[in-house]
Image (tube, rainbow, N blue to C red):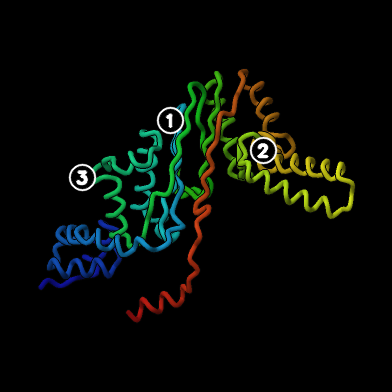
Amino acid sequence: MAQITAAMVKELRDKTGAGMMDCKKALAETDGDVDAAVDWLRTKGLAAAQKKSGRTAADGLIGVVTSGTTGAAVEVNAETDFVARNELFQDLVSTIADLALANDADLDTVMTSGYPGVDRTVEEQLTHNIATIGENMSVRRMTSLSVEKGAVCSYVHNQVRAGLGKIGVLVALTSDASGDALEAVGKQLAMHVAAAAPQALTSAELDADLVERERAVLSEKAKESGKPDNIVEKMVEGGIRKFYKEVVLLEQICVIDGKTPVNQWLEAQAKDVGSAIELAGFVRYQLGDGIEKDESDFAAEVAAAVSA
C-alpha cells in the first residue's frame, strides 16, 4: 500500500476543497492515486450531502451581477463564514449569479441548467460542493431587475470578491442619460439602500399588514395620552407619516447628503445629468435575513470532533 504523505493530502485538498480527514481516507482507499481519490470523493458526494442537509445554513454570500439594463441578485447559504472565504464556494456563487442573470432569475431553470465546465447541473454541482467542502449549502433566493432604457446598478457591502459580499443591492433606473453618469447616480443610490434598508419603493407598495400593525401600536400609545379622539387620530396619522419616512425609499433622507429626501435628491441628480431619472425598482439582499440560526456550543463541537 502506498504511503500517504502530507503533500498528497494537500494536493487533493487543493483540487477538491474536501476536509483533511476525507482526503486522507480517499487516498487510502485508492492506494495513493490522487486522480482516483478525486473520483472517490465525488462518488461519496450524494451520501455526504444527504447527511449534511438537515444542518442550518445561515452564512454564505450574496452575489450580484449587472449588464447594462439588467441585473440579478442571489443568496447562496453555507453554515460558516469560513466557507464563504473558500474559492470553490465563491466560484459557485458567482456562477449562479451569472446564470440567474441569463435566466430571469428563475430558480427552477437555474438549478436544472448545466454548470459551466463540468458534466453536472447546478443542483448536482451544489451537491458536489457540499460533499467536498463539508458543509450544508443551499440556493435560497434570486431576483432580477430590468428596464427598457437606462441602467441597473449595484453595490456590494463587505465585499470579499467582485460582486460577492454580505449585503447586495440592485437599483433600476429608467432614463435617457448617458451610461457613466447614470451609473454614478445608481451606485450612490444603491449605497443608500444598503445603509437605510428601505422596505418598499413607495408607501402604496408597503405591506398592508405591516402598516396596520404600526397603526395599532401608534393608536395605543396615543390613547394613553388621554387626549380627545380627534387629537389621537391626528397623532396616529403623524406617526404613520414619520414611519413612511423611515421605511419608504423615496421618502427616506438620503444618506449621501444626510438632509434631502431621496425623491428630491434624485430630481437634483436628474438636473445634473440633463435627463429625467425614474427609480423603477430596487432589490436589497442581506445575508441570512430571516433565517433562524441554531445556537451551539462551539467549544463542545470542537471537543467532540477531537474525541471522535
**Mark-to-mark CA distance, 2 and 3:** 47 Å
What residue is rendered at 45% in x and 34% in y?
A: 71
Quadrant in the rendering for residue 197: top right
Mark 2 lies on residue: 256
- Does 32 appear above or below 216? below
Question: Which numbered disc covers residue 119?
Answer: 3
Residues tagged 2 and 3 counted as in contact (Cβ below 8 A) = no
What residue is rendered at 44% in x and 37% in y?
A: 72
What residue is rendered at 37% in x and 63% in y?
A: 54
Position of residue 164 measured from the top left corner of the image (x, y, whole percent):
45, 46
Q: Quadrant of the C terminus?
A: bottom left
**Numbered disc 2: secondary structure:** loop
10 to the left or right of 181: left
**Mark 2 / mark 3, whichever is N-terminal:** 3
Callout 2, which amino acid?
Answer: Ile
Q: Residues within 10 Å of mark 3 (few under 14, many from 20)?
A: few
Mark 1 lies on residue: 67
Q: Quadrant of the N terminus?
A: bottom left
**Numbered disc 3: secondary structure:** loop
Residues tagged 2 and 1 counted as in contact (Cβ below 8 A) = no
Q: Residues within 10 Å of mark 2 (few under 14, many from 20)?
A: few
**Mark-to-mark CA distance, 2 and 1:** 25 Å
Q: Residues within 10 Å of mark 1 (few under 14, many from 20)?
A: few
Farthest residue to the right: give it: 227
Residue 11 seen in this snapshot: no
Q: Nearer the viewer, mark 3 or mark 1?
A: 3
Position of residue 234 measured from the top left corner of the image (x, y, whole percent):
83, 41
Query: Which residue is at the front of the view, 237 or 121?
Result: 237
